[in-house]
Image (cartoon, grey):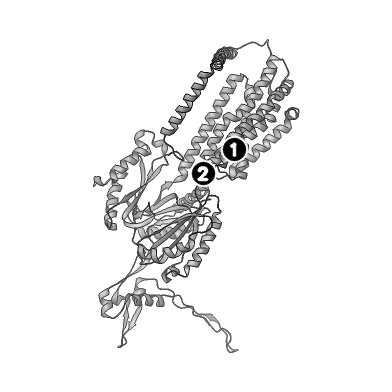
Amino acid sequence: MAKFFIHRPIFAIVISLIIVICGTIAGLGLPIAQYPQITQPTVEVTTYYTGANASVINQTVAQVIEQQTNGTQGMDYMNSTSDDSGSYVLTVKFDLGTDADMDTVLVQNNVTIAQSSLPSDVQSYGVTTKKSSSDMAFVFALLSPNETFNRTFLMNYAKVHLIDSIKRIKGVGDVMEFGSTYSIRVWLNPDKLSELGLTSSEVVSAIKEQNVQAPAGTIGQLPVPKNQEKQYTGSVESRLKTPEEFENIILKTQSSGAYIRIKDVGRVETGAKTTSQISNANGAPCAGFAIKLTNDANAMECIGEVKRILEEAEKDFPDDIEYIKVIDSTAFINESIHEVVQTFKEALILVIIIVYLFLQSWRATLIPVLAIPVSLVGTFASFTLLGFSINTLTLFAMVLAIGLVVDDAIVVIENVEQHMKQDGLKPVEATEVAMEEVQGPVVAIAFVLSAVFIPVAFLAGTTGVLYRQFALTIAVSMAISAFVAMSLTPALCAMLMKEHDPNAKKNALDKFFDAFNNWFDRMQNKYTGAVGWFINHTKTSVLSLIIICVLTGFLYKILPSTLVPDEDQGYFVAAVQLPEGTSLNRTYDTMDTLTKEIEEIAGIQNVMAIAGYDVLSSSTKSNTGTFFINLDSWGERKTDELAITAIIEKVKMQITPNHF
């Protein structure tokens, strides 16, 4: 095989170019993420029961829906949240590897069966089923720094101008809203209702009957007299819009002919639809939003599109409205990939220096420099077939693969160099002889390394999914490297390498290389002597191996373990819980005080506080609150005092109960 390519170098180069082109095209279209897709497919079922508390929702909604949903094909587990605001959220987790779209259909079918048993108010509101993720990939806020606009206006502005566009983005599973839009609020006086013999249900019925969009039919439509000349579509007054129109709704007609209207038993105003949460950002009133992605979403593309929409909309914001990014998970992904790419460059430069130092020929050094990109870039083509993404693990695997794939090229080049130097052969002849000797070991190296890494791909569960991409990336790069070492590398050796001239004058660099070679030969002799000593002292060798194994086991026991290492994500979330029964006003005052103190901590950029939202259970409670805290960029936090762990400890000191 190698001899075929030695005499056909153009063919070898063309094949390598095809590999590089395929890898480049695939790499440009691959999704980019922090880690491989290890989250389980998630389906969310949501609804709302106006006026009901958590206990009522649990009995009339949760139990009905969950009885039908339980046991859905492929389901791993499910959990639900019912709170006093009237909302109900059911989260169904499915096994890894299942189709999220099919999971959603299966859950929807079961929910449909349960709908007929739900309260009429819940049926009117509707039950929504959609695939989503439990992680908040992006959190932002619209705020009014000078408090020109209140929270309800900001939420309504976002709903009209932003949220619909964001929900249409591919990959967006859900948009959580920390606040409420406008609504008509009717406040009834129970004393006046009792005095006039009315009930609240009668008021609700009157509003439903008189606040309708009724069809008016058509005037002049067939059958009509033959002399009919005109035809008109009727139009009647639409739904009520202003508080005054609602106040004039007739509730009852007295025997005297007088009307009893809503304004006689209460008042009507325009206000927030719900008042169960109060949100601030950097001390100013805000409307907060959290973007949840589907489990198969491309985070970089999806969040990038969200930010583009926000940046374009910001140009048309009214005065005293601005938006801030509170949590942006893609910032850490970009930073992580940047660091890995930087490491990749450093490793490549180090390889070039080492190869040049030992081979001592720029021609010989150029060959692995050309061969390495073919193996690494070509690996991206396999990502498309295997369903991989560009993430920190696959890039880290490619960093490690640099040292492995370069070995194949070095084995070939060094053997060719040796035959040219010692046997006086010409480049083509030396390459043919060298490849007859090393093509077997090159293939053997690829198989041995594949035997080490490929079994990792068969691990089950989250660990298997996480490290499968790492292992197969190295295995594929080694396979391509072995092929390149049998095709492109010998072809380049025959083309680029030159015969040695024993009479050539030596320059200063040659003298340096001679000194280095002499030193290396001495070190090699010492190493060979040490190996020989251990061979003659088998008991000592075995004892040393046992000691190393014992120390390895001891370190394995004492060192902390984790699925993935803790990283500075650039943000963190803090939860606040006050005594049970604490009013929302008290919770808000407490969080407002904490916000002012947290903002003074060095390294913190933005703080969004949501009073009434419990991030731990994703529910609404008057005695709970959540802080979304965004930190300065990593380049501005290089000291230990500005590390995320140090900042978290300082925030803990502020939130601790003894602080108050």
Image side of residue 52 versus residue 330, left or right: left
* Mark 2 / mark 1, whichever is N-terminal: 2
- Is residue 208 found left or right of 349 in the rendered image? left
Quarter of the rendering occupied by the N terminus:
top right
Res 374 seen here: no
**Mark 2 secondary-structure assignment:** loop
The answer to which of 53 and 399 lies nearer the viewer is 53
Q: Residue furthest front?
A: 539
Residue designated by label 2: 33
Please name the residue that numbered disc 1 is placed on. 454
Q: Amino acid at mark 2?
A: Ala
Foreground pick, 100 / 7:
100
At x 72%, y 22%, the residue is: 433
Q: Are marks 2 and 1 in contact (CB under 8 Å)?
A: no
Q: CA distance from mark 2 to mark 1?
A: 23 Å
The image quarter in which residue 632 lies: top left
Q: Is residue 227 visible?
A: yes
Residue 163 placed where, x, y %? Answer: 46, 57
Residue at (61, 18) in percent of width and height: 360
Q: Is residue 93 above or below residue 405?
A: below
For the residue labelled by badge 1, is the local secondary structure a helix, a strand or a loop? helix
Numbered disc in front, either 2 or 1: 1
Residue 476 x/y as whole percent: 62, 37
Residue located 51% across and 35% down the image: 340
Residue 640 position within the rendered picture, expressed as x and y whole percent measured from the top left:
36, 33
Mark 2 neighbour class, 10 Å CA radius: few under 14, some 14 to 19, many 20 or more: many
Say which amino acid is labelled 1.
Ile
